[in-house]
Image (cartoon, helix red, strand yellow):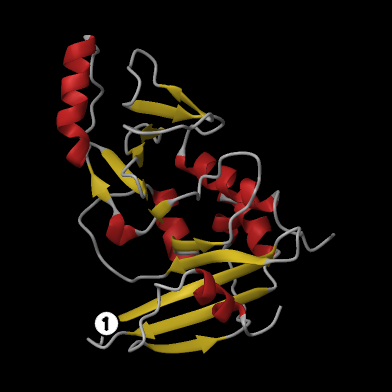
């Protein structure tokens, strides 16, 4: 791959960079991952190893706000570029997160944008997401869904689960949110509006509240499933 990976990204995600932003690029950087990261996320690491192009992107806005990213780029099986723009923000937050989540943020960053649509014939965990994993986007508890959840549970005579220690780590454009429980590490989707086929209503719950995601129990499962979905659509190095 060549040094135009960022140009390809901005052609597809044209709203991301503003005309008055100052952009600095470092092409084809080397990125090392710790043994702990490799052991925790082996499929994800395998995906990252296949990346023949990682670009460091530093953006300074007109208000002197500085943001830094890694642009991971792959080639799909039809020969088109695709990838993730990962935010490597350095912020502190009072929200407690899982150690596996912090490990992911420390070494890869959170997924700010993805580009290129796969006609994969199945639902991708990266589809239509505003963000995934990013620390500055995290919220604790059910937030804006609390009243709806209360009302549905009352109407359907369903016992509510404890939502106080749920951490929202992914948010779809339509508002659906994906959480993990700090105590059990279980991943749950709260979907008031969906057409998914890869989810099941949480046991003893009602439609359009909490769901489980097929083949995903924990945050690590979620990360590995996401990586596996992309691996099925890109050209691995050994091909």
Q: Position of residue 154 (x, y in %)?
A: 16, 14
- Residue placed at 41% from the left, 33% from the top? 194
**SS at badge 1:** loop
Q: Position of residue 1 (x, y in %)?
A: 71, 78
- Residue placed at 60% from the left, 75% from the top? 54
Relative to 65, is 3 on the left or the right?
right
For label 1, count other residues whose C-alpha is less than 10 Å away and answer few (under 14), some (14-19) or many (20+). few
Q: Position of residue 116 (x, y in %)?
A: 58, 61
- Residue placed at 47% from the left, 66% from the top? 86
Could you say which quadrant of the image residue 205 lies in?
top left
- Residue 129 drawn above or below residue 181: below
Quadrant including the C terminus? bottom right
Q: Residue furthest right?
A: 239
Relative to 162, is 177 on the left or the right?
right
Say which of 23 and 167 sits in front: 23
- Residue 210 drawn above or below residue 123: above
Q: Position of residue 149 (x, y in %)?
A: 21, 26
Q: Which residue is mark 1?
A: 65
Residue 42 visible in the shown view: no
The number of callouts visible is 1
Relative to 176, is 220 on the left or the right?
right
Residue 211 visible in the shown view: yes
- Residue 3 drawn above or below residue 44: below
- Residue placed at 51% from the left, 80% from the top? 56
- Residue 80 drawn above or below residue 117: below
């Amino acid at each position: 791959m060549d040094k135009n990976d960022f140009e390809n990204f901005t052609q597809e995600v044209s709203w991301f960079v503003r005309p008055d932003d100052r952009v600095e690029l470092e092409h084809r950087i080397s990125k090392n991952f710790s043994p702990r990261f490799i052991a925790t996320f082996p499929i994800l690491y395998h995906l990252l190893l296949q990346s023949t192009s990682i670009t460091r992107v530093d953006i300074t806005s007109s208000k002197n706000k500085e943001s830094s990213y890694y642009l991971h780029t792959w080639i799909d099986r039809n020969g088109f570029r695709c990838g993730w723009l990962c935010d490597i923000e350095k912020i502190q937050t009072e929200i407690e997160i899982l150690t596996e989540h912090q490990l992911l943020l420390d070494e890869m960053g959170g997924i700010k944008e993805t580009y290129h649509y796969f006609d994969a014939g199945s639902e991708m965990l990266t589809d239509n997401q505003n963000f995934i994993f990013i620390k500055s986007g995290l919220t604790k508890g059910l937030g804006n869904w609390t009243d709806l959840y209360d009302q549905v549970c009352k109407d359907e005579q369903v016992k509510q689960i404890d939502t106080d220690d749920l951490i929202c780590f992914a948010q779809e454009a339509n508002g659906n949110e994906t959480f993990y429980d700090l105590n059990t590490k279980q991943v749950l989707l709260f979907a008031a509006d969906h057409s998914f086929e890869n989810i099941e209503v949480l046991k003893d719950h009602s439609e359009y509240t909490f769901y489980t995601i097929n083949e995903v129990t924990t945050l690590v499962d979620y990360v590995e499933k996401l990586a596996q979905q992309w691996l099925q659509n890109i050209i691995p190095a050994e091909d």
